Image (spheres, rainbow, N blue to C red):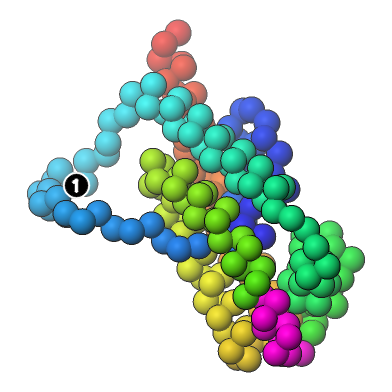
């Protein structure tokens, strides 16, 4: 799932496990590109204020909270239950995780339709999440990259190029990479806030 069972707890570092991307269109590029900066300017690290770092912390917490709320409001039905029973691992502690990882079955026509239906159901939450992250380019890029990789796996699954086991194995690998990058970004942001707090003392 795009973000699975995230618990919102402060401090920010507790958001580090909320970047799962396996269930998102990338944001559109600006219509007018700015003139490229000289290499020396581009290489210089951006100087950020304490308030900017605190604002980013709040934006991130809000984005994750709104995604969790959107997911919780998505109606569950027999189709979704079947999706997690037959096709996609719901969570690391799912009882059928090992069976799905070992599965050498390819999707039936009916299962293909079910995958498309679930992805359409999830699309509004994914799009809203990326809009919320637009003000946080580092996080938006990490999530978008994970979405691109997971969407590629979904496409190959419905095209019959991946078995259910291969698909779930790839999604777990994508999730692990995205989680690692998300945790790095959260730690960097938390470090920026902590440094600012120390400077104020």
Residue 180: horizontal and vertical position, in percent? 57, 54
Q: In this rendering, would 36 be left or right of 72?
A: left
Residue 162 visible somewhere in the drawing: yes
Residue positioned 44% across, 32% down in the render = 56
Q: Secondary structure at mark 1?
A: helix
Report the magenta residues as a range: 105-115
Q: In this rendering, would 3 be left or right of 45?
A: right
Kindly report the secondary structure that dominates the magenta region of the rendered protein.
Answer: helix
Quadrant in which residue 158 is drawn: bottom right
In front of the other: 124 or 20: 124
Residue 78: horizontal and vertical position, in percent? 83, 67
Q: Quadrant of the C terminus?
A: top left
Q: In this rendering, would 44 be left or right of 3?
A: left
Residue positioned 32% across, 29% down in the render = 48
Q: Residues within 10 Å of mark 1 (few under 14, many from 20)?
A: few
Residue positioned 47% across, 51% down in the render = 130
Residue 114: horizontal and vertical position, in percent? 70, 77
Q: Is residue 160 above or below residue 137?
A: below
Q: Quadrant of the N terminus?
A: bottom right
Q: Is residue 96 above or below residue 17?
A: below
- The residue beneath circle 1 is 42
In front of the other: 108 or 91: 108
Residue 8: horizontal and vertical position, in percent? 67, 35
Residue positioned 55% across, 56% down in the render = 124
Query: Within the magenta stretch, is there residue 111?
Result: yes
Query: Within the magenta stretch, is there residue 169?
Result: no
In front of the other: 115 or 45: 115
Q: Is residue 21 above or below residue 5?
A: below
Quadrant in which residue 135 is drawn: top left
Residue 97 visible somewhere in the drawing: no
């Amino acid at each position: 799932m795009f973000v699975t069972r995230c618990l919102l707890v402060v401090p920010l570092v507790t958001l580090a496990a909320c970047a799962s991307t396996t269930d998102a269109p990338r944001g559109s590029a600006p219509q007018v590109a700015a003139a490229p900066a000289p290499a020396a300017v581009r290489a210089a690290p951006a100087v950020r204020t304490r308030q900017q770092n605190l604002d980013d912390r709040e934006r991130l917490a809000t984005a994750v909270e709104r995604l969790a709320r959107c997911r919780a409001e998505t109606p569950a039905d027999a189709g979704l239950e079947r999706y997690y029973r037959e096709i996609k691992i719901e969570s690391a502690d799912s009882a059928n995780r090992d069976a799905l990882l070992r599965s050498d079955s390819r999707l039936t026509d009916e299962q293909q339709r079910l995958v498309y239906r679930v992805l359409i159901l999830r699309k509004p939450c994914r799009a809203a999440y990326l809009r919320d992250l637009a003000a946080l380019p580092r996080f938006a890029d990490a999530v978008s990259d994970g979405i691109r990789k997971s969407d590629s796996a979904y496409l190959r699954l419905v095209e019959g190029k991946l078995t259910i086991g291969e698909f779930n194995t790839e999604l777990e690998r994508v999730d692990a990479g995205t989680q690692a990058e998300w945790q790095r970004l959260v730690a960097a942001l938390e470090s920026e806030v902590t440094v600012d707090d120390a400077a104020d003392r």
